[in-house]
Amino acid sequence: MIDYNRLIHFVKPYYEKKDIMHDLTHIDRMIRSANQLLKFYPEITDHDLIKYGCYFHGFIYLDEERIRSFLEEEGLPEEYIDKIVKVSWESQKEEVPQTLEGKLLHDAHMIEGGKTYLIVKSLCTGTARGQSLEQTLEYFEQHVLGKGKCYLPEAQIVYDEMQQFAEQFIRDLRAGLEEV
């Protein structure tokens, strides 16, 4: 097990310059979602693996080698480091996870924040990118609405609810904007 303070010290710089939807609070939300899903999967007993996968999720694609070096310095065996790296990659939205732990992390990422979160995240992220509301809505309709997939049945239910809410919200917002 890695000392939590050293883990935070290592990952914190990777999240400091990210927008409010992708900073360390994003990892906290993922961990909460993962913990909710873990209730359905008692066969997943390595909760540290899940936690490490969450923390490395936000920058595995930027600095895998540095993550591996950090984990080696922490004294973790190479086989375990490989598992951490694998589930961190599998947590990415575009990935098709192969392991149960990877599916759980992937889905925790997809359902973080609950029913209203797709809308909130998109509006905040669009603002952080300097997009107009129209640009954000177009991006949302092209890249988020009706997109994405969860692999665990418990997460699929939540994600479907998120998508339905988002679709209705966008429809109502567009109607309201046209009325003005």
Image (cartoon, grey):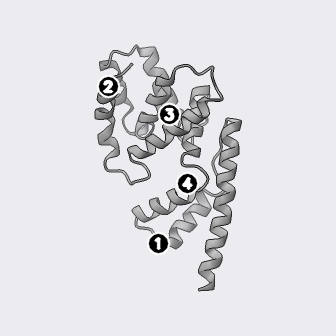
From mark 2 to mark 3, how far is it between C-alphas? 17 Å
Give the residue type that dot 4 points to.
Answer: Tyr
From mark 1 to mark 4, how far is it between C-alphas? 19 Å
**Residue 62 at x, y = what percent?**
38, 39
Q: Which mark is residue 132?
A: 1
N-terminal of the pair, mark 4 or mark 3, is: 3
Q: 152 or 81, which lies in front? A: 152
Give the residue type that dot 1 points to.
Answer: Ser
Marks 2/3 in contact by CB < 8 Å: the verdict is no
Q: Residue at x 70, y 44 (%)?
A: 157
Give the residue type that dot 2 points to.
Answer: Phe
Q: How many marks?
A: 4
From mark 2 to mark 1, how far is it between C-alphas? 40 Å
Q: Is residue 41 visible?
A: yes
Q: 140 or 107, which lies in front? A: 107
N-terminal of the pair, mark 1 or mark 3, is: 3
Relative to 2, is 17 above or below?
Answer: below
Q: Residue at x 36, y 35 (%)?
A: 63
Relative to 72, is 114 above or below?
Answer: below
In front: mark 4 or mark 2?
4
For mark 2, give the secondary structure.
helix
Residue to which mark 3 is pinned: 89
From mark 4 to mark 3, how far is it between C-alphas? 22 Å
Residue to which mark 4 is pinned: 117
For mark 4, give the secondary structure.
helix
